[in-house]
Amino acid sequence: MFDEFDREIFTGGQLIFKYGDMGDCAYLIEEGSVEVLVTKDGGEQRIRSIGKGELFGEVSLIDYRPRTATVKALERTVLVPIPRKMMEGLLEKSDPILRHLLLVILERFRHRNNNSMLPETGTTIPPEQSKRHSIVRGEATQKLSLAHGLKRALTHEEFRLYYQPICNLADGRIAGFEELIRWHHPSDGVMQPKDFLWIAEQTGLIHEIGLWALKRTSRDWPTLRKFTDYQFPFINVNISASQLNNEMFVEDVEAIIAGQNLNAAELKLELTETAMVEHPESALKIMRRLIKLGCGLVLDDYGAGHSGLKHLQQYPLTTLKLDGTFVEPMLQSAQSREIVRSSIALAHSLGMTVIAESVETEGLREKLLEMKCDFGQGWYFGRPATLQELALRYAKPDSS
């Protein structure tokens, strides 16, 4: 397993490193054993001995601070050095809160072990390392603050739902709406989903937020439904990868449908390819149960994800949503036109309806209609708005 690493061999009693040395690696014991010593009452005291297969010197994998103990070989010992540079990439990619937590634990460990008595020479943290620690601390603080704010937002009704019309391309009439969440932050103003849902995913708050959004949308749907005279109206609700892989999600959806007396066929759940990539087997199981309830399943951002064709074949999807990155340049790009045209034809051959995102002009609407696309969504048909704003926008004139 470690054949690509160099070995270091020590004889019995030989010093491997001493308390206060600057460390740049940890060691894995391949053969032999070592003793770990600390300075106490003017002398060295063994606190433990460790043998084959164990790791020591691990503190130096996290930062460049001095060694916290002395280690000597008890017998002929073969060590595999694990350089800190191996860990730097992993640490950089790890969660800033976890990195900050590790640094805090190490600082408290050193303080407890009276590391303030370390020699002055050579113990200063390198400036670049100090800067990194400061950045990590700032990122961790910001993330913790954001997570705390999300929890508060749920209890203080800071989230708002906006709805964007999805229109029948043939006549421009509203066929349905997509639910879009916004955070009305008390100090930062209106925040878009991309700015806060990622932390909700990582902290597990996405389940509470997603459930809140689904309940609120179902409650608003009877009013929204009045703004469409389409034969089969629908409301699209976005769900996350975490929700789709939660065994209780189907029960939650079923309870909301029953509680709001909602026609399940009018509820379409939008999901991205990520939701299916992370846990494909459980996602398929849950999707089948949702279809059995009568809900529709929409594959969002088709073409911008991982392996769209595979997902169209494997999962019980009812609607394909074309990503705006292909729709927007369609009038100028023959390649984009062909991607959109072939995607629509493929979806129809599989019995799916198609929604095109980012329909901003009449020209795009006409081209999509020519390609037999079913629905369009974009500023040409209407911007996202609150329920109250939509009521004013689509208010029917008083017939009296």
Image (spheres, rainbow, N blue to C red):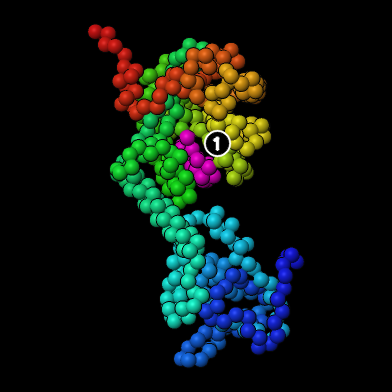
**Residue segment shown in magenta:** 238-254
Task: Tell me the kind of residue under disc 1.
Answer: Thr
Which residue is farthest top?
400
Q: Nearer the viewer, residue 384 or 44?
A: 44
Q: Is residue 244 above or below residue 229?
A: below
In the rendered image, residue 56, in percent from the top left (x then y), is placed at: 60, 75
Q: Is residue 127 above or below residue 332?
A: below
Which residue is farthest front?
121
* Disc 1 residue crowd, few under 14, some 14–19, many 20+, Cα 10 Å: many
In the rendered image, residue 22, in percent from the top left (x then y), is placed at: 55, 74
Q: Nearer the viewer, residue 366 or 285?
A: 366
In the rendered image, residue 124, in percent from the top left (x then y), is placed at: 47, 71
In the rendered image, residue 269, in percent from the top left (x then y), is placed at: 50, 33
- Visible residue check, residue 191: yes
The residue at 33%/39% (across/down) is: 189
Q: Is residue 355 above or below residue 129?
A: above
Q: Is residue 174 above or below residue 157?
A: above
Q: Is residue 339 left or right of residue 46?
A: right
- Visible residue check, residue 351: no
The residue at 58%/19% (across/down) is: 332
Is 242 inside the magenta-drawn segment?
Answer: yes
Quadrant that contains the C terminus: top left
Q: Nearer the viewer, residue 117 or 210?
A: 117
Quadrant that contains the N terminus: bottom right
Task: Look at mark 1 in the image and give the residue it sits on.
Answer: 272
The residue at 64%/20% (across/down) is: 334
